[in-house]
Amino acid sequence: MVDIKKELNDKQYLAAAKLKGPLLIIAGAGSGKTRMITYRIAHMLDNGIHQSNILALTFTNKAAREMEERVKSLTSKKLTNLTVSTFHAFGVQILKESITNIGYSENFSIYDQTDKMSAIKESARELNISPDVLDIYEVANLFSSIKTKRDIWNDNNISFQPLYNEYQEYLVNHNAVDFDDLIVLPVKLFVENPDILKGYQLKYQYIMVDEFQDTSLTQYNLISQLAMKNRNICVVGDDDQSIYSWRGANYQNIIKFETDFPELNEIKLEQNYRSTENILAAANSLISNNTNRKEKELWTGIGQGKSIEIFYPENESNEADFISEMIKSFHQSEKLKYHDFGVLIRTNNLSAIIENSFLAENIPYKVSGGQSFFQRKEIKDIIAYLRILNNPDDDINFLRILNMPRRGLGKATLLKIREIALEKECSLHAAATELRWNGDSPLSDKIQSSLQEFIDMIQDYREMLEDEDINKTKMIRDLIETINYWGYLVIEHQKNEKLAKWKYKNIGIFIELFEKWEKNPDNKDKDLGTYLNRITLLTRDDDEDGDNGQVNLMTIHASKGLEFEYVFLAGVENNIIPHARSIEENPDNIEEERRLFYVAITRAKQKLFMTSCKTRKIRFEIVDTGPSPFLEEIPKELISFHTPVANVKDEEALDYFEQMKSKFN
């Protein structure tokens, strides 16, 4: 039997020991909620509650797996009948058992996003609508919002209602469900079949929900239906960390829970086991400015700790170099591993400059919550061309660029090239070169001409690289124009010119990063292969750095639930956080943006750095930026100003901050 009183603090113990009736646990950041949940489930089992009567729901497969493993480890039991699941996996389980009651057969298919968009296209054709005139991605998002009741039909979207109805009919006719149906259909099943609902209520008499603030209205409806009879439901969440409204999360489900279960008990977990007093004081002060929240005050026994440090670099390049230099310094002086550092950004488009600085300083890193800049398709396309110029025998990258942009060199041409390569035991490029000069070519004149142009272009640029003094940056710009990559993007994204422009802008950023490397006076080896190998070594997926790990570069959204010894929060500027578009859509979003900033602050264990650039390049224009207004909500006594130049005092930095405030107010 597990001694929960010994293992948990007083509030955690109260939460774990209360098994009967509805329970609302407000679990602050770093308050040990996962530990409490684990012990609560163990306590249920110790008190004779059968494992098959327990349902624990969370949001990610990883979280569900970890929770289940912890309970099994704590109890030393196999627990094969305990249900610890994500909402969607639980929905699949219900549908597998009962979907025949709502008009489907039991061997239904689940459509992923790609399948869903294909189904929408087919539905459009049934209505004599050309899919080419639709932004299928946006239509799919609209249908998801309508189905989950995040949106309703109105004057702006009503024209899509016939297509939505046709899509729904398509799903039924093909015995298929989409991801939204995995929650929506069980709710429908229970409403239309009270006897089936009673069966599930009899089975799952004790329900726990983790990350309750992230539940959607539909998910809430599902769990409240299940819990309404026995009323033994425990929800664990933190309204201050509700940051997913854009995907349907509704922190007001906490209020709805209080209405539907008025007899509930509420317990607040406010002792933080992660951060120092200074970090928590900053977080508490910031979040107190939100009005729609449960009052709570995080506290810790860890100690005061170090001050929060703010740096005002001139631009984003200086910002990235500062972060790199500090990480290298602390890695060496304080013996911290690279995985002890978290670098958090509001949006993915801030990552490129930081990644380039990490590459320059040989700092291993990984990108979470978004794609590494160097892994984006448009960047990999250009890098593939450069790799072939550096090493034409690279078959993988030769295959990538042979018909990209499209030049008529398709499967038939590739088959001929492969035949020659196998016969001559040579690379694809060597085989293609032989085919290019073949006077008796099996290819059509048009294809032969296109192959000649391609091979000659590769040779021309390779010859340019033989000149050690060539401006490689200019050569890359010329190459991108020669292959007309912009034209390729326009064709590929005919219905989304905005996306094409964004991808082409990324290529511009890549060229700027390369130019910075080429012009660096400390860079003695300007060989193209050196640059390409540098990217490969430092952006590889596997971690060969042993215990040192990799620096974690991620969006703030992706950082939720994680913690790092040292955190660098980059781009703490007005219009970045709070994000301009979010506020334009709805001024009330300021509270979610503040919650996002709060989440970022509370990731730090020992030390928090924040950087706010004086200028930043936005859409190829250098603009003056201002510090985030959220900085004003942190008490000044908690902050010190980083001063890389000697003799600049905190008072002078503070004076600069006040000047910037007045300028941008």
Image (cartoon, rainbow, N blue to C red):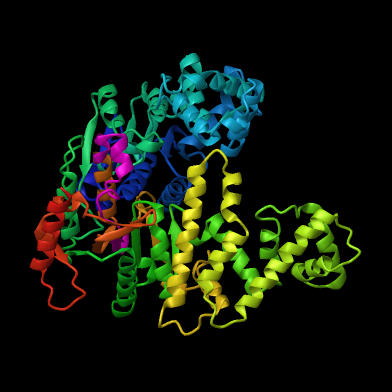
* Residue 361 sits inside the magenta stretch: no
Left/right placement of residue 6 relative to residue 443 reads: left
Tally of numbered discs? 0
The residue furthest right is 440
For the question of whether residue 106 can be seen, the reply is no
Instruction: Determine whether 559 is above or below 531 in the image.
Output: above
Picture coordinates of residue 462 (x, y %)?
65, 74
Left/right placement of residue 385 relative to residue 399 reads: left
User: In which quarter of the view is residue 102 placed?
Assistant: top right
Tell me which residue sits at (29%, 53%) in the image.
Answer: 600
Left/right placement of residue 365 relative to residue 600 reads: right
Tell me which residue sits at (41%, 83%) in the image.
Answer: 522
Tell me which residue sits at (47%, 60%) in the image.
Answer: 508
Instruction: Determine whether 89 is above or below 5 in the image.
Output: above
For the question of whether residue 16 can be seen, the reply is yes
Q: Which region is colored magenta?
A: 563-590
User: In which quarter of the view is residue 92 placed?
Assistant: top right
- Camera-side residue: 400 or 642? 400
Picture coordinates of residue 54 (x, y %)?
42, 35
Instruction: Determine whether 563 is above or below 254 in the image.
Output: below
Picture coordinates of residue 657 (x, y %)?
14, 59
The residue furthest bottom is 524
Picture coordinates of residue 13 (x, y %)?
25, 45
- Camera-side residue: 527 or 325? 527
Tell me which residue sits at (30%, 46%) in the image.
Answer: 579
- Camera-side residue: 316 or 541? 316
* Residue 582 sits inside the magenta stretch: yes
